[in-house]
Amino acid sequence: MQLTINIVVLAAIYALICCGYVLIYRVSRVMSLAHGELMMLGAYGLFATAGTFSGHPLIAIAVAAVLATMVGVLVYVALMRSMTGEAVLAAVLATIALGIFLRGAMVLVWSAQEQHPIRLLGWTNSAVSIGETARISAAALVLVVVTALAYLSLYFFLKYTVWGIRMRAAGQNPLLAAQRGIGLHGIYALAWALATFTGGIAGMLIASDTALDQTMIIIGLKAFPAALVGGLDSLLGALIGSLIVAAAEVLMIHYIDPLLADVVPFFVLLVFLIVRPWGLYGSKEELDRV
Amino acid sequence: MPSASGYFRTHYGEDTRLLDTRTKRVCYALLVVILVALPFVASAFLLDLANQVYLAIIGAVALMLLTGYAGQISLGHAGLMAAGAFTAGILFKEVNAPFWITLPASGLVGATIGVIFGLPSLRLRGLYLAVSTLALHFIVIYAGGEYETKRGFSTGVIIAPPRIGSWTLEDPIAWYFVLGLFAAAALLFGLNLLRSRTGRAWRAIRGRETVAEALGIPVARYKLAAFVVSSMMTSVAGCLFAYYRGFVSAEAFSLFLTIQYVAMVIIGGIGSMLGAVLGAVFVVLFPYAIEALTQVLPTPAAWANAVFAINYAAFGLVMILFLLFEPQGLVGIWRRIQNYFLLWPFKQAPLSKGR
């Protein structure tokens, strides 16, 4: 029972991070390797606003979420905009460079100390028992709910709203979309904003559940195999991929060796890259096959 | 050095000659003299820097061959270096193997891993390839760390300096010449490969794979060859690194090391051997330059024990600036300066570019 809950929570973490990867990839065919850092930036945003708006936790969270969204737009406008149309390598490298820069800058601003933004908000992360034997922390419970909400709203956003349809169009065929009068830069910026928003929320929740420190970057990297396993351009795939990767990780840690934690997702990824490189739900032609 | 007056070549052989003009020969001879004389006048610190640069050049040349010429993205460079270093470490610890066995052995291990790294490249391209090499990086590092913990070398494996006969390689000046020779060999090997059939095939594959295939180039074989050659060189560099430091530990081969090597290729200038050298020099010296800068410039007191963070931030910033404003890298700047003086008083380059 406890194992199941651990799997669900870890899967929710990965899934919430993954939707950033999927959104950006689906719309602009760029893979953001700075996602872990951007996530951490979101968490530090909450840390900063929690200090400023002490006593008003809801305002602090809202401001932090807005800040996280702005970061996405900023990243696109300042950096990724000039990378559109460049080779894949250049865009990926730009995100790597951004990640390194953020990693250093965050330590300079907030120091490398472990932080607990939830304490600044004046809340405690109490455990809730489920059934007889299993327990789940409140933050983890919120995380699962938020992930479900995020996926539901993203689904409806992409399916029914005008901007969502524009995003899908831009992802399918940028040239045609542009000819129909869709402003590609706006769409790309929106994708980045949504990605950093969900990533930032994920970062805030992880920071509330455990702590805010450098390990978050690794979590961001480990979520990446989940996105690939599911298929980089499918939200449903990201959910299922997260479940698979999380299950593999939790079970391996439990039954074999705790040291495996950082490697298991990549093992799963390699297996999938060899067997089914386009992922479970990804479209096959995505993968520019040789 | 390009000449402003045009190219007067009468044989095909002259097109592929490495040193084609007298000026070039004189310049390189001078460079060799300076490099040979350097260790006898330089301080211990400078000597260590030079050795690090030589080590980096081997790795950078290897990555340049793979990424800059064959066009295959690899994010597993640190993993490959770790493979070489751990081969040396394990062989030394387990069977007390001498230097002249561990070095070829790590080359062999590198080549084997290169095949494994390269196999996904036959099916995958671009992003997916980058990711699969990234995954392999984590697995190699995990295997290394596992060896350390299982055998009880939790802080790392200590390796004795290499011994050939009764002579041990310990002196920094001796190291300087050994590493310098290795770096020169790597450069020459790379340059020679590039002017051969293999190099031309790699460039064709990088340009457009389908066309390369249509021209009759066995794409799969040459892709694998690129991975094998590059991995072997990287692995040997890793082995040398292990001996030079006298110490192997999984922590030394983090993802940041990969990023540093990728940065060497980018900052140096993709698709140029000179770029690999310039990039290696730049990236190795960069942290020291930053450290010197922080001592000169006023910085907040809280930054005093966060030197690595300053490094990261500055490094990321420089990489971003290069990607945005100088995608040709240092070589691009160097060529522009050259052209400025060559063409002066004119500004436009001749329409037909020599190379």
Image (spheres, coloured by chain):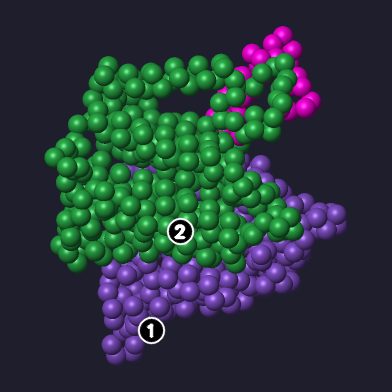
Left or right relative to B252: residue B196: right
Question: Which lettered chain is shown in green?
Answer: B
Label 1 vs label 2: CA separation? 39 Å
Residue B273's place in the image compared with A259, above or below, is above
Q: Which residue is mark 1?
A: A4
Residue at 20% in and 63% down: B149
State the residue lying farthest toward the bottom: A132
Q: Which residues are magenta?
A: B328-355
What is the x, y in percent for residue B284? 38, 34
Q: Quadrant of residue A56?
A: bottom left
Residue at 16% in and 46% down: B160
Palette colour of chain A? purple
Q: Amino acid at mark 1?
A: Thr
Residue at 45% in and 19% down: B29
Disc 2 residue crowd, few under 14, some 14–19, many 20+, Cα 10 Å? many
> Is residue B36 shown to the viewer in this render?
yes
**Residue B352 belongs to the span the image colors magenta:** yes
Q: Judging from the image, what secondary structure is the residue with disc 1 in? A: helix
**Residue A139 belongs to the span the image colors magenta:** no
Q: Judging from the image, what secondary structure is the residue with disc 2 in? A: helix
Left or right relative to B5: residue A260: left
